[in-house]
Image (tube, rainbow, N blue to C red):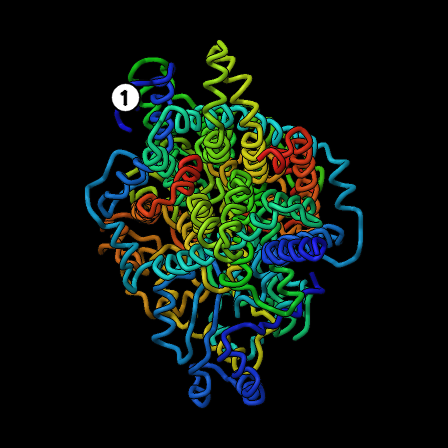
Amino acid sequence: MRRSTRTRRAPGYWPRALFFYLYLLFLYGPILIIAVLSFQGPLASMTFPMQGLSLHWFSEVVDPGGFSRQDFRMPFVRSLILAIIVMILTMGLSFLAGLAFRKSFKGNIVIFYIVVASLIAPSALISLGIGLGFNELGLQSQWYTGALGAHLSWTLPFGVLIMLAIFSRLDPSLEEAARDQGATEWQTLRNVIVPITLPGLIGVALFGFTLSYDEYPRTSTIVGEFNTLPVEVMNTINIAATPVIYAIGTMTTLFSLVVIFASFLAVYIIQKRRTGAGLGIARKAAEADSS
Amino acid sequence: MRKTSSDKSKTGVSRRSVLKGTAAVAGVAAATQLSGGFPTVWSQDIKDLTLRSTGGPWSHFQLLENMANEDLDFTVQLTPVGLDEIQKRGLTQTGSSDLFEPAYLQMKFFWPTGKFQPWDTTKLPEWDTVVDLYKAPGKIWPDAWFGQGQNPSTVSYTSGPDGTDFVEPGSTQWLTAHPVLHNADTLGIRPDLIGRPIDSWAELINPEFAGKAALVSFPTIGLMDAATAFEAAGELTYGDKGNMTQDEIDYSVDRLIQLKNDGHWRALWSAFNESVQLMVNGEVVIQSMWSPAVTAVRAQGVPCVYQDLKEGYRSWTTGHVMPSHLEGKMIGAAYDYVTWYHTGRVGAMFAKQGYYVVTPDNTRKVLPEAEWDFWYEGKPATVDIYDPFGNLMEKPGTIRDGGSYKNRMGRVAIWNSTMDENKYLTRRWAEFIAA
Amino acid sequence: MVRVITSVLRYRAALQISPLSLALLFFLVGPVIMIMIMSFYEFTGFMTVPDATLENYVELFTSSLTGINYLQTLKMVGITWVVTLVLGFTLAYFLVFDLIELRTKLLLFLLCVVPFWTSSVIRMVAWVPFLGKEGIINKFVLWTGISSEPLQFLLFSEFAVFLSYIQIFTLFMMAPLFNVMARINRDLIEAARDNGASGIQILWHVIIPLCKPGIAIGTIFVVSLVASDFAAVSLLGGQRVGTVSISMIIQMNMAQYPPSSATGVILLLVVLLIVGGIMRVVDVRKQL
């Protein structure tokens, strides 16, 4: 495979490659600056020149002690838990919706437009609206109730639209073939549909996690008495002008790199195993389906 | 909004809900008999209580929470959020907290909703030690300025236990909010980049600083700063800069737009961090600033002065408001908390950050004399000055700019306010942003 | 018999769609209804009073500010859309057609996603050391003598906001384009080439038409993201750029929930209409 890559470069390959890597640089530039600046000493500003070199700001985040202004640890845990729940729900609900949208059921257009509206609705108002709704029901919104819902209203449209794209690519003859071979509905779903759409599902999961983990405007008013990480980061901006938020940014990026590459490895292994099992059709489909 | 005010927390921690139900009777007794000091008779009962307070990250942090939990018999839990969020949560998610600490300029939004209950001054043993700013006639000292705009005393009292109005200061025993902190803002300048003395708000609009001046993005505060500058420059004499007429708003906004078109404003900032960054990065050499923000700029090795000006200061204050959903022992806990807050230890801690808790006499009892002289008397530091988080703030010999407590709080020209023409002002401000 | 099976199938679709419908009913439709009700409440200047009034809408439609805000928003949306489209298309094209190995494609795609896990607020703040008066770019500009004065338009300007939008939102255009491009049958391209079509002709007559659904979805993403943003406008625009969202947030921060809700409801309708228009041109669902 590698050989064929070398032999046939399409015209315009190099300009496009250069363009792509410049974009990556553009994307990572601020992140790199954040990373570099977060290693400053205790008396530091948020810009160059660097003032000293230490892990001071990381220790502020990891172990602030009793004398600190902020404790990011619990908000981080909350945001992580919330993002994982949102990720799983987004994956599940989007997958089911994807299945449903393959048939034109009654009201599919209405639901589709509601999905789109969910994307468009001004975030601060959704937050206000959910809060008012909870009030009407005599409930108090918390990060694991109202805010969870607010996150879903944000991640689901992305998940559903991506699943729509993936399912539309799924050849119905695959299922028919499976059914002809005597597979039950459940077996077809488990052994044919899920494996083929898995890379796409992982894409949905990534979107779900990412969008939830960083959500502020839909969350801030309705998290209840316990803040999530983005709310706490916003607080930092209201009281401090130190590299402490850079340290959070750097740690988040490192953490995400680890998770992303773990999931990449997972996909890779799954595909490898699938190839090994000799499921040729699935492999071909996965090849075409590279999200 | 009124319709949704019945948001009694039903989903709160179950322990609390149970407690609420069973202990209501005993709780009422506790609240009505509470005579101050720290709880004694009821301490067993209130041990399991958690009092939640929501306020700015400048006053709701781990250190204070730890101090409270060391000293008090119940659990105190602080939730920090930005000023805009305090208001949003306080007005629309009142059940999310047992106390809110808004700024007084937000009191006209908070109080009339009827979602909050007043404090009874007769049950606040430390009330006598609170400075006179919050009592009639609204002056911190007899020779202090009353100031334009919303003097805190004018929104401090309500007519009765169910009042939703504001009445003459001192005419009742019912407080809308229990005052917590105050301080004065003024122009922060970069002396190294300006190179000449600055002594008037008029300098904020001096063409010399075109492209190097900034404004607070909070509509009323930004407009009041600008108006103070216009008046100091002799352009217009306002009736009350803290409560402008439509014509005065029009004049001010039109001038702001004109200045914007001339490229005068480098930026409008909304967060502490932004105001510090603007100064540190040399984007801006003159803008109105909080005193701790000026300190933060200097902490990064950049010269910055919190400039005393002849027209005086613009001042703000915050207070604890108590939601109506509190009942019985929770009310008792709230009273205990604010009482504890003003016994001195907290005041000393905040003094080291450059804020003033409203009971300075009690603060003085706890704060070492050298530090009192530095923070309150405006004298040169004789020892290393540390902030409460253990960071070195000032070396011996430095003088706190802005001068003594008396010089700041005694010379407040204008209070952060919500104006009667709030709606008109907001729209015109949005036009300024869009211009 | 056939009828029974189809009704079961229909029932199954209903079951499959119901979790999504319920979630959106509770957390989108419900809240939007609350906001709509709120938008008809009266705001006295300090307080929200639940008395029905059209005042908020009347003011919205008669204020000259509304037009200015919408023009500004449209401008932000338009420019961001064009740039992210060109960028996203080129990047997706590179990933899909220029790279052969699936692993490399996935890896590079994931690399594009990673920065999104760092709080957007932190990422925006990080532009300041780049773009400021004493930032890296201006140091370079002064050093090379391109200009003797630091360039001020770099920060606290529309430019800075666009830069941040393009940085953040290109992914949202690229991802759906990546999806549809990956689906294009290579045989089609080969056939066109065999018939003597030039590279540009293939791009214009084969690839772009097949990418339409991806473009449509990406457009929906970008339009709605830009229209509802206020963080970038506020942090990098120095609050000098007045969009509809900014006006809405200003009202909200001044406790003016009814007028703010009215502004939001109309913004939602306007963007929905734009998306509806896009859907008329490209039926995203059919073509996917």
Q: Position of residue A144 (x, y in %)?
A: 49, 63
Residue at x 45% of width, y 90% of height: B41
Q: Is residue B299 above or below residue A49?
A: below
Q: Amino acid at mark 1?
A: Arg
Residue at x 57% of width, y 67% of height: A140
Quadrant in the picture for the C terminus of chain A: top left
Q: Position of residue A248 (x, y in %)?
A: 33, 49
Query: Nearest the camera: C219 or C159?
Result: C219
Would residue C229 be visible to someone looking at this image?
Answer: no
Q: Position of residue B203 (x, y in %)?
A: 48, 32
Quadrant in the picture for the N terminus of chain A: top left
Q: Residue furthest front?
A: A181
Query: Nearest the camera: B132 or C73?
Result: C73
Would residue B38 be visible to someone looking at this image?
Answer: yes
Report the number of discs: 1
Q: Is residue B243 above or below residue B104?
A: above
Query: Nearest the camera: C180 or B175?
Result: C180
Q: Is residue B286 above or below residue B151?
A: above
Can you tell which quarter of the image residue A11 is in?
top left
Q: Is residue B46 left or right of residue B324?
A: left
Q: Is residue A262 left or right of residue B222?
A: left
Q: Position of residue C28 (x, y in %)?
A: 63, 53
Helix, strand or loop at label 1? It is helix
Q: Chain of mark 1?
A: A
Residue holding disc 1:
A6
Q: Residue furthest left?
A: A53
